[in-house]
Structure formats: structure tokens, C-alpha cells
Amino acid sequence: MIPTRRLSRPPGTPRRRHPRTVALCAVAAVAGCQTPGAPDRGVRPIRLTDVGGYLEFVARDREIEQQSKSGRDRKKTEETIFEESLRIDVEGSVYHPNLLEFTLGGLVGLLQQDNSEIVNERTRTHSDDGDIYEFDLSGQFFKKKHYPGQVFARRRRAIEPRRFRSSLETTTTTYGANWQYVHPKMPTSLQFNQTTVDLNPFDPEEDDGRQQNSALRFETGYRFAQHNSLSLAYDRRSIEQRPFELNFDTDELTLSHRWDFGLDNRHRLDSEINLFDQRGTFDIERRRWREVLRLLHSDTLNSWYVAETLTRKQGSLSGVPPIDETSFSLSATLEHELYQSLSTQLLGFYRTQNFKTGPRIDRFGGQVSFDYRKRNRWGNVRAGYRLRAQREERSGGERDFEFIDERRTFRDPEPITLTAVNINVASINITSEDRLTLYRRGTDYTVEAFLDRVEIRRIPTGEIADEQAVLIDYIFTVGGSFDLDTLNHQFNIQQDFDFGLTPYYRLRRQDQRISPSDATGAVAEDITAHIVGAE
């Protein structure tokens, strides 16, 4: 592969100012603008405070060759790209900067690309010429008033090289507006934006892609007093993607209340109601109510308590029966600080999940942790210990669950590990992050199933690159009647020397017991891990 050579201004360097052309001055004169450096002859409708630009030339050349050692398969790809563009940037205001202050940038140019591909003895070539068009507009209204606003529109394009495939041209177009009402009692804001990403491979045999996201957010609130306030947030989103059809609209409403009370208002109660509805490729309906109480007992002792109830109905992409879940959780935490060097924390928790057509899951337990830190003659020493005990009780029948778009990254030589129990290996689908490519099992990756996990490894000769992020969909089964007890120990100690060295030791131990021992809904796993190192 030949490195890309950019024949343009290096990123991060100050922009060199070029002399303004006669055309720019003519346009400014026709518009009645006040150009930089010109004498002030009274109020002008448009005042330009800065004008600049640059020319940019880009040349890219890529050559990729792939030869199989186990057969005669041979693939060679060559790609050449030239870009010539001119950019002009303008800053100014309309009548006065406090009325409307704007920045405007535009780029125009030409693009030429040649692509050839040789697969065994078959040769395929493709050439194309195109235009380059980018813009960037931003305007601020009434920025010193209590009702400021902003409008913006921008278009950016980029060329992304891809392993063993043609480069991908991405064009991102965004526009929107923001408005605020600055008020001590009732602050309000309204935001809207729409982003469209066009994905165009240079190979004409590949499908184009398009992603369009629209978002509207409205926020307001009312402050009854300094320590008593109510807030409301509404979000509306719309997503459309192809070639993998994924289209849905969402509405989310959050109503929250904050109340500070007690001596010096040292205690706090946060209440929140959240309503979420999604319609489209798969439907989701969620209702959540959460209460969080924080108590400051003294300068060294505090506690907090969380209670939450949730109902959820969720559809499917692959024929799995919809989820109808009701859950409730409760937790309490007590924290104590001793001389700013030892922190002790006690936690107790309980959670229950009920599925209308499936299992019931109850989890409860506790945790104690110590965190010690002390300055010594060489630097700082830090140590910590955590003990966690949990019991999980499941009852009822089995049911399938679907995981959609789990984002994971391949990092050789380690595989991607899916730890859900009873994964349906045949249901695993892996796509690229841009959703343009569906990777093939046996060609791009391999799957190996174990009793307690599934490992996915990339094939070096496939289309998945090392350090590449992907999206994984799969189905797993939850159910059965059993009790699972888990006891976790974690210990760590390290010395941070002032000259930069940090040696450390870490211990992790897990003991699990399942009853009955022949239960298939979970796998009991005992782990002991010692880690010694230095940084």
C-alpha cells in the first residue's frame, strides 16, 4: 500500500490569509457589505469581519494483494483517487453582532477515481469523475438577550479506506436550530437537528447505504424555590437506515422533581417518571418510576436509597415472542470516611423480574468494600477489598431473548466472547458498524461454542480487520428452575512511586454453587486469578 500524500495545508496549522479576489469584492459591494479594512461609511446591512480560503490537492493510491496459501485464489485491488478543491470562509454580522452573527464556509472541487480488481484470472475496472461540494453555515441570533437562538447547516465528506474492498465515500449533511429562554424561574430550550449520512462505495457492484436521523428535544422546568424544582424533557427521534431496513420513531417523556430538605438542606430526594415508546421495525414500550433518597448524617457518614419499578414490552427482529416484563428493585448504601484515607461502604440489594410468558428471576445479596489510600515517603499506596454475596432464584418455564446490535471489537489474538448462557449459535449475525456489510461465517469469522460461553474469531483472510468494531445480533435462552449462589472476592494493592513506576497485585476469586446440580439454565463457575504487574 502506498501512503496517502496530502498536498494541502497540514491539520492544526494556522490558516494563511490570501488576498481577496475581485469577485469577492464585487459580491460584497452588490450586497452592501462592509469588508474588512474598508472605511466605515455608515450602517451597513451586512458587515464582513474576516474572509479567507485555500486551495487543496489530494492524491491517494492504494494497492492490495491477497494470495491464499491453501489454494490458487488470488485477489489484487488497485485504487487511485485525485481531488482538487477550493475553500472560502467568511465571518460577519447583519447590522450588529448582537442581532445576527454568522460564519459561512464553502468548498467546491473535482474528484477522479480509478479502481481495478483482479480475482484469479478475471479483471474488472471502473472509473468515475464527480463533484465535491461542502458547506458550513452557522448563525447566532440575539446572543445577548434572554431568548438567544442559533441555526446551522453543514455538509462534510470523507473517504475511508477499507480492507480488501474499495474505499467508501461518506457524505454527512446536518442542519438544525436551537433556541433558549433564559429565565430564573422557568428556563426553557428547544433543539432540532437532522443528520443524513450517504455511504457510497467506489465499487459499483456494492450497494449504497443511507442513514437518516432526526431529533427534537424540548426542555422546560419550574423552580418553586431554591431547593425545590420540577423539570420536563421530551425527545422525539426518527431513524431510517438501508440497505438493512431499520426504521423506527421514538417518543420519550421524562418528568423529574428535586427537593432538598433537612438542616441546611443537606438531604435530597429525586423523583423521576420516564415514558418511552418506539414504533417501527420492532416496537418497545417502557414505563419507569424511580425514587432516590440521599441522606447526609454527618461530615463522614452518608447513605442513599434507590427504589425503581419498570414495565417493558419489546418486539423482535427474528420471530422471537415479544417480551412482556415487570420488574422492581430496591437498594440501600451506607458509606463512611475515616480521616480521608479509609472509605468503607455497605450495600444491600433486591431485584425481581416477572415475564408474562416465561420465568421469574429474583436476585438479592449484599456487598462490603474497603478503599485505603495513604501518602508515604515514596509516593502513594492504594489498596482495596470487596466481598460480594448474591443469590439468584429462577422459576418458571424457558423463553428466548434477542440481543440486537451488541457492539464489540476484534483484537487479535483474543476472540470476542459472548457470556450469555444457551446462545443459539445459528442465530449469530455480524455486520459492520455502518450496516453496509453482512459478514459470512466460515469466510470472515468462526464460532466455537463452550458450556459457559461462545467465542468468535476473525479469519485473517476475511473482510474483518484487526481492531475493527462490529455489531452482533443473537438469540439466547433464559429459564429453568434453579438457585445460584455466588461469592466474589476482589483485592488489589499498588504503590504509585513519585518517579512514575506503579507495581501492583490483584486477586479475583469467585465461588459458585447451583442447585439442583443438573440444572441447564446456568453454569456454575469457580475462578481464581492472580495478576502481578507494573506500569
Image (cartoon, rainbow, N blue to C red):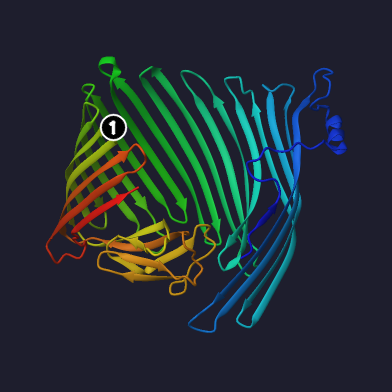
Q: Is residue 124 above or below residue 407?
A: below
> Looking at this rendering, what residue extends furthest in the left direction?
516
Give the image quarter of residue 530. bottom left
Q: Evaluate whether residue 213 shows in this view.
A: yes
Asked which secondary structure carries label 1, the reply is strand
At 19% from the left edge and 60% from the top edge, which residue is drawn? Answer: 525
Q: Is residue 38 above or below residue 405?
A: above
At 26% from the left edge and 28% from the top edge, which residue is drawn? Answer: 294
* Residue 174: % across, % down: 62, 44
| Of 137 and 312, the residue lying toward us | 137
Quarter of the rendering occupied by the N terminus: bottom right
At 14% from the left edge and 67% from the top edge, which residue is drawn? Answer: 518
- The amino acid type, in three-letter code, at marker 1 is Val
| Of 261 and 460, the residue lying toward us | 460
141 left or right of 250 in image: right
234 left or right of 263 in image: right
Q: Which residue is identified by label 1?
A: 292
At 25% from the left edge and 27% from the top edge, which residue is drawn? Answer: 340
* Residue 384: % across, % down: 22, 41
Q: Evaluate whether residue 87 shows in this view.
A: no
